[in-house]
Image (cartoon, rainbow, N blue to C red):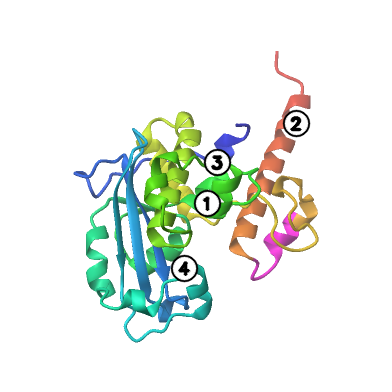
Amino acid sequence: MKGMADLFPSAPIPATPFPDTPAAVVRVIDTETAGHRLEDDAVIEIGSVDLDLETGRIFNPMESLAHPGPIEINPSARRVHRISDEMLEGAPPFADAIVPFRGASIYAAQRASFDRSRLKLPGRWLCTYKLALRAFPDTRAHGLQSLVKYLPLDLGDVTERLEGSHPHRALYDALCTAVLLRRIAEELLPRCAGIDDFLTRAERVSTEPALLARLRFGRHKHVPMREVPTDYLEWLVREPKMDADAVHTARHHLNLRESAQLAAIARLLPQDA
């Protein structure tokens, strides 16, 4: 893919603090919550599967409800995940529910900052949303179910596990996210020096603001970022309290344009004999 070096740049490979854990296995995890701000929220369901990046195998499905205690579920959140109070009766508290999900060296989630802040699981974290923006920048939308539809994702080997469930249940979304990460790896791994290199690049991308494919607001809303005028990108960078993803993306494209201009000038200069 043209420009892949810019979309998925190389990074130094750090030593892992979990040397006994296979580096190629990622625990793909999803969280459903009561739907409040972080400080007021409660996890009510966790689901995960493990993905072997070397073989593409998805295995070890786990799921657990978690009782939210005195925290009430936001009606808007309940309409999305459809987890009722009756379903939560007898569920373990979060402190017990989280135990089986611990122990992985690498976790991945579609919006990793959301899941990581609530689960507080140590390890390296990958964000499949930010990675999908790098791997598939021209896809129509980058929400999980949009990627299932528009890439499209082949869910064939997880179909049996999906039956009887629906999007926005934790295991269902974890399964779809695992298939997405597998597809991302298929796209990006051939451009890397092995799995360690891929994971290091992916982790760095996951900790940065998102590299948006299209502008999400303003007079250039929905326009691909590579087509947004330079003066507007410069305004985005200067504007106080601007969305971090927009600023990061604007700087990225301004740097690309500056590099292209310098390269064009260099080609016009006389070459030494």
Tags 3 and 1 in contact by the CB under 8 Å rule? no
Q: In the structure shown, which secondary structural element does the residue marked by tag 4 occupy?
A: helix
How many numbered marks have been drawn onto this rendered protein structure? Answer: 4
CA separation in Å, label 2 and label 1 = 31 Å
Q: Residue furthest top?
A: 273
Q: Nearer the viewer, residue 232 or 1?
A: 1
CA separation in Å, label 3 and label 4 = 28 Å
Residue at the image point whose x is 44% and y is 44% from the top: 179
Of the two numbered discs 2 and 3 on the same chain, state the one appearing first in sequence.
3
Q: Is residue 72 above or below residue 91?
A: below
Q: In the structure shown, which secondary structural element does the residue marked by tag 1 occupy?
A: helix
Query: As drawn, is 111 to the left or to the right of 236?
Result: left
Residue denoted by label 2: 264
Residue type, label 4:
His
CA separation in Å, label 2 and label 3 = 27 Å
Residue at the image point whose x is 40% and y is 61% from the top: 170
Quadrant containing the C terminus in the rendered view: top right
Residue type, label 1:
Lys
Disc 1 crowd, CA 10 A, few/some/many (<14, 14-19, 20+): many
Residue 238 is one of the magenta-drawn residues: yes
Residue type, label 2:
Ala
Residue denoted by label 4: 81
Q: Principal SS element in the magenta part? A: helix
Q: Magenta part of the protein: which range?
A: 233-242
Nearest-to-viewer mark from 2 and 1? 1
Q: Is residue 59 above or below residue 237?
A: above
CA separation in Å, label 4 and label 2 = 53 Å
Residue denoted by label 1: 130
Query: As drawn, is 33 to the left or to the right of 226?
Result: left
Q: Is residue 144 visible?
A: yes
